[in-house]
Image (cartoon, rainbow, N blue to C red):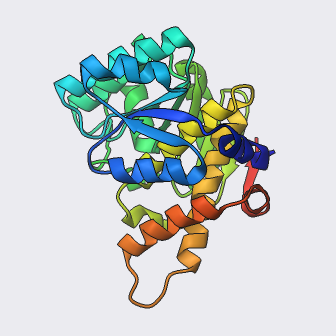
Amino acid sequence: MLKDCLGQVRLTTPLVHNITNYVTVNDVANVILACGGSPIMSDEPEDVEGITAICGGLNINIGTLHQSSIEGMFRAGKKANELGHPVLLDPVGAGASALRTGTAKRLLEELKITAVRGNISEIKALVQGSGTTKGVDADVADAVTEETLEQAVAFVKQTARAFGCILAVTGAIDLVSDGKTCYVIRNGRPEMGRITGTGCQLSGMMTAYLVANPGNRLEAAAAAVCAMGLAGEIGWGRMQAGDGNSTYRNRIIDAIYNMTGEELERGASYEVR
């Protein structure tokens, strides 16, 4: 059950190493804390192996790449693989530049990745080698809708098998698959797209869920997606006149902090295909 996945995070307080982008690093740390985990941030190549060794999992986010951080990603990833720790890849902006796309593809090829979390345009770029990503946002032409859902589910399952890991494609409708089973999740609010970094936050939180639930990682990934979407709904319901996207960001984090397993189980909107 989804509530058990949340409960394990709170029970075990997983320590997550994040090599993430400097646009959202503070929010990623706060969301991991809010869900019950513990974050640590480091991308210095000489530091990352030692940091990864004391953590339970690694979250790699390519949102603000530079040559030093790229080296750090590979060194940390290889250490995490050596230790058997889960590794999540967030290919932010794949398809927007050759460096982003190429780096994400190399990480997939050279590391054992446990889960990939991205929008549909980013994932298509990894599959095709190029894409129509609009900056770090999905191209509207790629959007998963009720009309395209059947094809999207098939694509996500096929791609998860090709990648050899769990694949979480997030958007208006979220899809989470291990190549056999696919969770179709309908939580969230469109206004979440007006906040920088909700995807980055989800990747950090999902890593904590993966660490805390080693025997049930598909459901753990789906539970994290449901929790973030539900927090978006709860946070939006608490907005007041004059509030904007900055307040909304904080309300989402607060909703994650206060969320109970029962609330998650009751509020999660998903089906399994």
- Hey, which quadrant is residue 67 in on the image? top left
Q: Which residue occupies the extreme top position in the image?
A: 82
Residue 247 screen position, x and y as percent: 41, 74
Whether residue 172 sits left or right of residue 246 in the image: it is right
Q: Which residue occupies the extreme left position in the image?
A: 67
Residue 216 screen position, x and y as percent: 74, 30
- Hey, which quadrant is residue 254 in on the image? bottom right
Q: Nearer the viewer, residue 193 or 260?
A: 260
Q: Nearer the viewer, residue 261 or 245?
A: 261
Residue at image position (44%, 55%) is 198
Q: Nearer the viewer, residue 27 or 96?
A: 27
Q: Nearer the viewer, residue 171 or 63?
A: 63
Number of marks in picture = 0
Residue 86 screen position, x and y as percent: 56, 24
In which quadrant is the N terminus drawn?
Answer: top right
Q: Residue 64: in sight, yes or no?
A: yes
Residue at image position (38%, 88%) is 242
Residue at image position (60%, 48%) is 36
Q: Is residue 207 above or below residue 244?
A: above
Q: Residue 188: in sight, yes or no?
A: no
In which quadrant is the C terminus drawn?
Answer: top right
Q: Is residue 40 above or below residue 228?
A: above
Whether residue 265 sits left or right of residue 84 in the image: it is right
Residue 92 screen position, x and y as percent: 35, 40
Residue at image position (44%, 35%) is 123
